Image (spheres, rainbow, N blue to C red):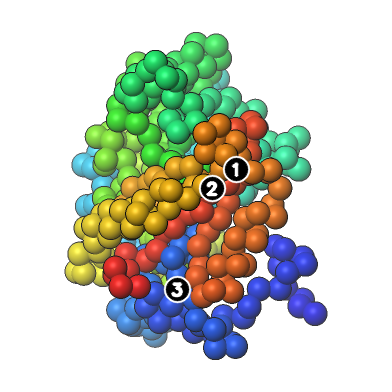
Amino acid sequence: MSHVFHRHCHHLPPTIASGNGMYLIDTQGNEYLDACGGAAVSCLGHNHPSVLEAIHRQLDAIPYAHTGFFTSAPSEALAEKLAELAPSSINHAYLVSGGSEAMETALKLARQYWVEVGEPQRQHFIARRQSYHGNTLGALSVGGNAWRRAPFAPLLMDTSLIAPCYAYRDQGPDETAYEYGQRVANELEAMLLEKGPDTVIGFVAEPVVGATAGALTAEAGYFSRIRAICDQYNILLILDEVMCGTGRTGRFFAFEHEGIVPDIVAIAKGLAAGYQPIGATLVTDRLYEAIASGSGFFQHGHTFMAHPTACAAALATLTTLEQEGLVDAAEKQGEALKTALHHQFDSHPFVGNIRGRGLFVALELVADKTSKRPFSSDLALHQTIKYTAMHNGLMCYPMGGTIDGKQGHHILLAPPYIIESTH
Ligand code: PLP
């Protein structure tokens, strides 16, 4: 019997013993090729010496000091590095302990911005149906994953959900990919007009949808239209790059592919590559200055924010990504992975769609390829896929089931950027 409250009460997973590069090894000596980085976390693979050394050095110096009393050299250096990597208008990083905290921070920061500039009537977020932004109540409120939301629905903020950009399922026979992208982006404008633009805080989206829809990229022009609508109606654009950011798509930020700059962007999973828990909410100078020159205090915070050891691990991760050219590698290996998947699975009767960007790739599974009918929506299918893959020495990330009766299951592949074609 385990005293750990595991998320699956009736399944005790194997016990991890060690890791090496692309592989994890359990206490029984079984090796698993990590083809999903856990949940798109392990971008450097396992036991990378440069990150381990940075953590050891920081532990020897000072592992932790509360930010109410001190700042630290690694947190200052990390924020400076993130500002250097971000577009020129983004120069401030709020450092937290993970993805949900980063998104929770983003939502509260956006709300406080409007309070500071004298528009407290803005109380509403617009987000998208197939999306996930974290499991805390605020972040869950703006997520569209019906299964995750269901038990907590009465506790969630009222959020308006519009369609994501999901061409495989929704593009009409008479429209081009571009026209389709514009049509679904315009749902934001329609929703804004319905709600009243000056009641809305911002629009929340993942540039590439991760776990809920499986590496779902938007059609060209979709996000520029979204940015234009946010500007026209003066609402904030909040991007969630917790899963798709930190180089996974072949650019440090996934929004770079779209030619836009958000007002707020959250990153987390790959930031310290899993060696320490950390997330960050990056904001534009405009938002930061409104708070700095207003109340002068962001009314939010966590005990472990800007944790020095986590910041040291993140800094070493970013340095390693740069020194080893791993963001470019993610783009190149991602292309190789997609080509291999097409070769292997295009004619498979249950693989309806292969998609993604960089090393963020998914296969959507369907019971019938012509009608795109999904398998039934229970959890059993993706659990079976996961355990069968592990039994065969492979870690992949199956998710899904129908949402709105439309979406299939998918298998997400998000391997460390050190993967080579021979793995
Ligand atoms: N946002 C996205 C896009 C995610 O994929 C996740 C986690 O899967 C989160 C937020 C929440 O991050 P965390 O699990 O670190 O709290």
Residue 113: image tag = none
* Residue marked by disc 1: 367
Dot 2 amino acid type = Phe
Q: Residue at coordinates 60% horizontally, 67% vertically from top-left?
A: 388
Residue 33: image tag = 3
Asked whether, in this view, residue 142 is left or right of residue 320, the answer is right
Q: Do the residues bearing badges 1 and 2 touch, measured as CB atoms within 8 Å?
A: yes
Q: Tell me how far mark 1 sits from mark 2, CA to CA.
A: 6 Å
Dot 1 amino acid type = Ala
Residue 414 image-quadrant placement: bottom left
Count how many numbered circles sit on residues in the image: 3
Query: Which tag, 3 or 1, sits closer to the chain's start?
Result: 3
Residue 337 image-quadrant placement: bottom left
Secondary structure found at label 1 = loop
Q: Tell me how far mark 3 sits from mark 1, CA to CA.
A: 27 Å
Secondary structure found at label 3 = strand
Depth check, mark 2 against mark 3: the one in front is 2
